[in-house]
Image (tube, rainbow, N blue to C red):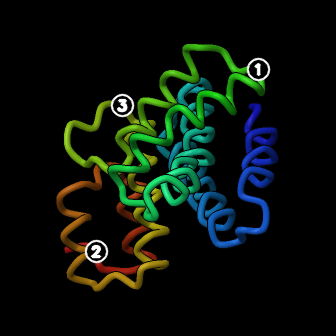
C-alpha cells in the first residue's frame, strides 16, 4: 500500500487547515476499516484508501474560485487536483482515473458502482454526521437510502442510531 505518501502530500496540500486534515484522516480510517471488514481485494482497498484521503481535494480550489465548497464544485474541481497530485506521486493512470471518477461523484448517492465508491460514501457520511451534528432523523433517512455494507450499517448504529 502506498497510502502513506498520499497522506503526507495531502497534509502538505492542506497545511495549517487542521479541520480539513482531520476530516480526511477520519474518512480514511473508516474507509480502511470498512473495506477490510467487507473483504475487499488488495487493489480495490488501495483505491478506496487513496480516494478517502483525496476525496475533498476540490474544497480548497472551490473556495478560491467560487467562495464556497458546494458538493457540485468539489466534484468538478477535485478530479484535476487529485490527478495532478497522484501523477506527481507516480501512481498509474488506471488507479488515478478510478480515484478521480469517485471524487467526481462522491456527493452523488444514486448509481453507486463498486464497493470502493459505496464504502467511501458511507465513511464520509459517518464523519459528516458527527461534524455537522445531523439529527437522528437525517441519519436514519440517509442510512435507509444509501448505506449498503453490513460493516457501514453496524458502525452507523454503534455511533448514532439503532437499526430498526
Location of the N terminus (image quadrant): top right
Question: Is 123 situated left or right of 4 in this image?
Answer: left
SS at mark 2? Answer: helix
Label 2 or label 3, whichever comes before in sequence order: 3
Residue at 28% in and 47% down:
108
Q: Is residue 89 above or below residue 61?
A: above
The vertical placement of 132 against 150, above or below, is below
Q: Which residue is mark 3?
A: 114
Marks 1 and 2 sit apart, C-alpha to C-alpha, by 38 Å
Residue bearing mark 1: 90
Residue 139, numbered label: 2
The 10 Å Cα crowd at callout 2, few under 14, some 14 to 19, many 20 or more, is some
Q: Nearer the viewer, residue 10 or 161?
A: 10
Q: What residue sits 64% from the left and 72% below the top?
A: 19
Q: Are marks 2 and 3 in contact (CB under 8 Å)?
A: no
Image point (71%, 57%), residue name? 14
Circle 1: is it few (<14), some (14-19), or many (20+) Cα within 10 Å?
few
Q: Residue at x 40, y 74 (%)?
A: 129
Lower sequence index among marks 1 and 2? 1
Q: CA distance from mark 3 to mark 1?
A: 24 Å
Amino acid at each position: 500500500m502506498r497510502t502513506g505518501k498520499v497522506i503526507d502530500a495531502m497534509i502538505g496540500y492542506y497545511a495549517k487547515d487542521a479541520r480539513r486534515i482531520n476530516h480526511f484522516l477520519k474518512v480514511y480510517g473508516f474507509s480502511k476499516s470498512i473495506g477490510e471488514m467487507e473483504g475487499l481485494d488488495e487493489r480495490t482497498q488501495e483505491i478506496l484508501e487513496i480516494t478517502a484521503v483525496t476525496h475533498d481535494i476540490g474544497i480548497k480550489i472551490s473556495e478560491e474560485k467560487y467562495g464556497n465548497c458546494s458538493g457540485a464544485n468539489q466534484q468538478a474541481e477535485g478530479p484535476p487536483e487529485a490527478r495532478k497530485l497522484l501523477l506527481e506521486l507516480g501512481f498509474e493512470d488506471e488507479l488515478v482515473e478510478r480515484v478521480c471518477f469517485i471524487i467526481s461523484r462522491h456527493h452523488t448517492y444514486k448509481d453507486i458502482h463498486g464497493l470502493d465508491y459505496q464504502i467511501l460514501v458511507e465513511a464520509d457520511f459517518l464523519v459528516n454526521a458527527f461534524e455537522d451534528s445531523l439529527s437522528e432523523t437525517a441519519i436514519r433517512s440517509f442510512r435507509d437510502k444509501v448505506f449498503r455494507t453490513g460493516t457501514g450499517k453496524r458502525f452507523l448504529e454503534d455511533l448514532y442510531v439503532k437499526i430498526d
